[in-house]
Amino acid sequence: MDKTDIKIIFGTGNAGKMKEIRMIMADLGLEILSMKEAGINVDIVEDGESFEENAMIKAKAIAQEVKRRGEKAIVLADDSGLEVDYLNKEPGIYSARYLGEDTSYTIKNANIISRLEGVPDEKRTARFVCVIAAVFASGVSFSRRAVIEGAIGYEERGGNGFGYDPIFYLPEYGCYAAELSNEEKNRISHRGKALEAMKKVIREEIGL
């Protein structure tokens, strides 16, 4: 199959996320565009009750717009977030909107640390969850989920991540997610694992 005939449109405007996605999916050899780069601007109401539902809502809305324009593409979208067990799995599916979409993650992270003040290590367990949804030009759709377990730290550390990475401690590696190199993070992260699983689906569906 001629790879030049196939492109992937990923439903995000997050530059940090697109950088990770391009690194992880580079070996597919396909053009990968963000929504903005593809010229797609659709209002998407993420009113699902799970990561799976919200990821698929995004992917299907973008795929519908791609089809309306008479184009063909593999549309991917993700829904990911942080679940803190002591906070009843908050912020969960509302991770991006926690304390308001325009609120900086420095403030969001400080709020979570504050809410866990005095909570011992063993009760600070948390995880990152990522679900990748895909809608192919044929209309078939798939989703893949991955998680990475960790704990909430006592301060922000590291400058190599984004979002909640600076407060997410990885006991197995003895460091915070934002202290990992790009290569290490992509290998072990929730998004990296979910994207690897989705790459297998893409290869099977389009015969790469």
Image: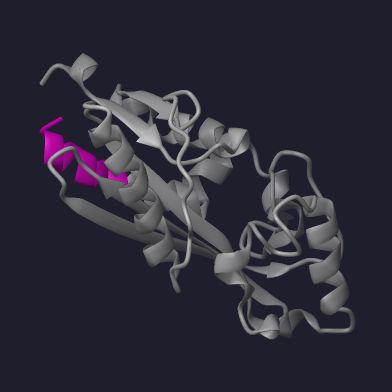
**Looking at this view, is 103 or 166 the one in front?**
103
In the displayed structure image, the side of residue 204 where residue 46 appears, left or right = right
Q: Measuring from the top left, give residue 61's x and y in whole percent.
A: 35, 48
> Quadrant where the C terminus lies?
top left
Residue at left 48%, top 50%? 191
**Looking at this view, is 109 or 62 the one in front?**
62
Instruction: Find the magenta span and give its range.
Output: 197-208
In the displayed structure image, the side of residue 32 where residue 72 appears, left or right = left
Residue at left 33%, top 27%? 27
Q: Measuring from the top left, give residue 18's x and y in whole percent.
A: 52, 34
Residue at left 61%, top 63%? 172
Magenta-drawn stretch contains 152: no
Placement of 105 over or under 155, stated as above or below: above
Placement of 5 over or under 25, stated as above or below: above
Q: Is residue 197 visible?
A: no
Residue at left 78%, top 40%? 159
